Image (cartoon, helix red, strand yellow):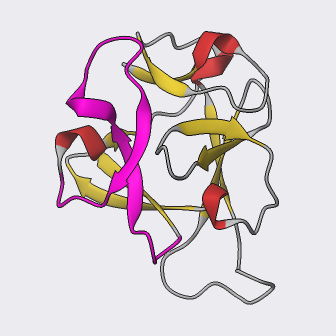
Amino acid sequence: MSLNVWGGATTVGTPIKLYERTPKANNTHFEIVSAGGYFARPEKGDRGYHIICANSGLYLCLNDPAGKITAKIRPPLDTAVRWNIAHVRNGAYAINNVNGDKKLQLNVRGAGKESGTEVISYAITGGAENAQFILKPVVQG
């Protein structure tokens, strides 16, 4: 399964859900870029990243209070669009939001594995499988 900008939409607020892995579909591609320092200060500690939907240029965004993850336009310093990526094990990563007060991460609702299952924010876990993601490079060809 892959993260998917649902339906290939390019509109603000489109949910991110699981879908069968489709390597050539742009709505399953995300650009992970360094977010740099915070409030014009150099980075300290874990590096922050923006995760950008390749099909639209919109940010992968944490939304409160519903917990849904969507594609949004936000200022780059908004913590809702800033993430830390931490190695968990065996090539899997946890993707944690940088807002330390809330301590949330990307998670798959109900540990679902079916197409259409929502990607949500959830309390940071100690390595639950539904909060682990494998990052693969996009090979253009």
* Camera-nearest residue between 104 and 65: 65
The residue lying furthest to the front in this view is 65
Q: Judge whether 88 appears above or below 61 on screen.
A: below
* Quadrant, the C terminus: top right
Q: How many marks?
A: 0
In the rendering, at what x and y percent does residue 23 appear?
52, 14
Specify whether residue 111 is painted magenta. Answer: yes
- Residue 96 point in image, percent of width and height: 43, 60
77 or 90, which lies in front? 77
Visible residue check, residue 51: yes
Percent of width and height locating residue 68: 50, 38
Residue 98 in the image: above or below residue 119: below
Q: Is residue 82 magenta?
A: no
| 54 relative position to 84: left or right | right
- Residue 140 at least partly seen: no
List x then y, in percent, for residue 8. 67, 13
Task: Work out whether 38 lies above or below 4.
Answer: below
Q: Which residues are magenta?
A: 99-127
Q: Nearer the viewer, residue 31 or 69?
A: 69
Q: Residue at x 57, y 88 (%)?
A: 44
Residue drawn at x 31%, y 59% as measured from the top left? 123
Which quadrant, please, contains the N terminus? top left
* Picture residue at 64% right of the left edge, 19% below the top: 27
In the image, residue 67 sits, relative to residue 123, either above or below, namely above
